[in-house]
Image (cartoon, rainbow, N blue to C red):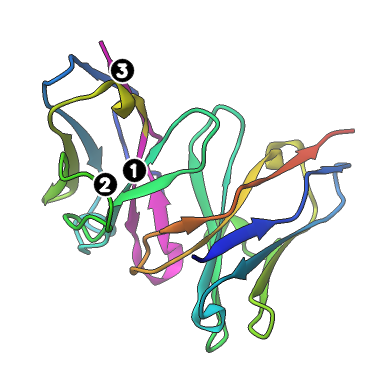
Amino acid sequence: QVQLVQSGAEVKRPGSSVTVSCKASGGTVNTFTFNWLRQAPGQGLEWMGRIISTLPVTHYAPDFQGRLTITADTSTGTTTMALIRLRSEDTALYYCATEKYDDAFDLWGQGTMVTVSS
Amino acid sequence: QSALTQPASVSGSPGQSTTISCTGASSDIGGYNLVSWYQQHPGKVPKLIIYQVTKRPSGVSDRFSGSKSGYTASLTISGLQAEDEADYYCSSYAGSTTYVLFGGGTKLTVL
């Protein structure tokens, strides 16, 4: 049974950067497409970007272009999301998720809370 | 590109059916058969319940069904049960610049 396990909560200052990792285990992890999504407190879901591990190719949502970098290590089944120039509006629960069907996210990590506050 | 539009809330009584709509544009819902629906209980991780407009992942109840007409996708839940009370989100592929859009979410209350 494949599981996605994310790194722990982070508290960051405005203007700084954050890195969140997500490790897949229990399956053919080197073929995964990893997506990153987030959910601000009390708000809806927002897709941020993805990496197609086998190529590798990244796609980023327009709102995150220039601030977001997604990487993957197929040997360890790990993906990492790095977001720079943080602002208070980036306070959210960040999720990694795999994409078994095109643009549909079937398996999710437990979420990582990132709080941006001065 | 704007998010997809969902009603903020819907409700229904146990045993009844209810439908949640998700309205987009020609560049997303209207252009591709790549609409998905997610169920999220409070404090829990979202769960995929519909993909590619009408398909259900293994293990998802057949009380959940999806459809699409023009720029609007719909999720129908039949035989409402108390456990169906949750937030529901739609998403759609939106082309090779925007990629994926989500709706704002709909809170389903089972009366």
| Tag 2–tag 1 contact (CB < 8 Å) | yes
Find residue A116 and name its label: none
Q: Residue at x 68, y 75 (%)?
A: A71
Type of amino acid under label 1? Leu
User: In the shown orientation, is residue B72 left or right of residue A109?
Assistant: left
Image location of residue B33, percent across then percent down: 20, 63
| Foreground label between 3 and 2 | 3
Type of amino acid under label 3? Thr
| Foreground label between 1 and 3 | 3
- Image height of A99 relative to A16, above or below: below
Q: Do labels 2 and 1 share a chain?
A: yes
Query: Disc 1 is attached to a residue of which chain?
Result: B
Image location of residue B3, percent across then percent down: 40, 44
Frontmost residue, A24 versus A41: A24
Tell me which segment is drawn in magenta. Answer: B88-111
Residue B55 lies in magenta, yes or no?
no
Q: Are marks 1 and 3 on the same chain?
A: yes
Snapshot quadrant of residue A88 = top right
- SS at circle 2: loop
Q: Do labels 3 and 2 share a chain?
A: yes
Q: Distance between the residues labelled 3 and 2?
A: 24 Å
Q: Which residue is drawn at 29% across and 20% down?
A: B82
Q: Mark 2 points at which residue?
A: B24
Q: Mark 1 points at which residue?
A: B4
Query: Disc 3 is attached to a residue of which chain?
Result: B
Image location of residue B101, percent across then percent down: 40, 52
Q: Distance between the residues labelled 2 and 1?
A: 5 Å
- Image height of B40 relative to A112, above or below: above
Q: Residue at x 37, y 60 (%)?
A: A104
User: In the shown orientation, is residue A48 left or right of residue B48?
Assistant: right
Q: In the rendered structure, which disc, 2 or 1, sits on the residue that comes first in sequence? A: 1
Q: Mark 3 points at which residue?
A: B109
